Image (cartoon, rainbow, N blue to C red):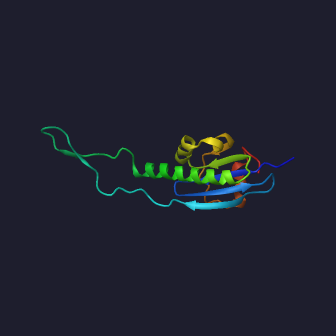
């Protein structure tokens, strides 16, 4: 019987790692590691609005905070790179782990073959954990 080949994504809002498991008892091997290429920044200050005929001017709040915009942008980049790695490999299932807000963003954006192959997603920030120690973080939900 052919062993399951699993692609594992561990990500937070600043960096991501893709790892592969080639069967039970084989552990995880790092495929690639990448970090956010750039931060979104506003070029100038917030706009101002005239409150009414006799009212003073008020600063306008941006519709989305910089942190949320950066999270959304990085999630899109991460899933794009993950989809490329997925397409090149002969993977059977996909697993991902991220802190809750990033995980929510990934869940909203995942699609296609990655979405169909998603076996488990965990709300944990484990990007900094050594590859040899990562399987124990998934032991309640999947066997590596």
Q: Closer to the camera, 73 or 57?
A: 73
Q: Is residue 57 above or below residue 15?
A: above
- Residue shown at 62%/55% (left/top)? 126
Q: Is residue 37 above or below residue 52?
A: below
- Residue shown at 78%/48% (left/top)? 4
Is residue 127 in view? yes
Residue 80: x %, y % from top left: 57, 51
Residue 73: x %, y % from top left: 48, 51
Q: Is residue 8 left or right of residue 49?
A: right
What is the total number of numbered labels drawn onto the structure image?
A: 0
Residue 98: x %, y % from top left: 59, 49
Q: Is residue 104 above or below residue 84?
A: above
Looking at the image, the residue that sits furthest to the left is 54
Residue 143: x %, y % from top left: 77, 48
Looking at the image, the residue that sits furthest to the right is 1
Is residue 118 in view? no
Q: Is residue 36 left or right of residue 22?
A: left
- Residue shown at 71%/46% (left/top)? 93
């Amino acid at each position: 019987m052919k062993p399951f080949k699993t692609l594992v994504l561990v990500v937070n809002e600043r960096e991501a790692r893709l790892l592969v498991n080639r069967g039970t008892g084989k552990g995880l091997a790092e495929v690639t590691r990448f970090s956010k290429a750039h931060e979104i920044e506003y070029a100038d200050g917030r706009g101002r609005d005239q409150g009414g005929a006799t009212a003073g001017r008020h600063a306008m709040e941006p519709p989305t905070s910089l942190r949320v915009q950066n999270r959304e942008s990085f999630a899109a980049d991460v899933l794009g790179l993950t989809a490329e790695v997925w397409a090149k490999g002969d993977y059977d299932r996909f697993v991902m782990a991220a802190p809750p807000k990033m995980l929510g963003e990934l869940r909203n954006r995942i699609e296609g073959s990655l979405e169909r192959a998603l076996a488990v997603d965990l709300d944990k920030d484990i990007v900094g954990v050594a590859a040899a120690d990562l399987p124990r973080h998934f032991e309640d939900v999947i066997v590596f």
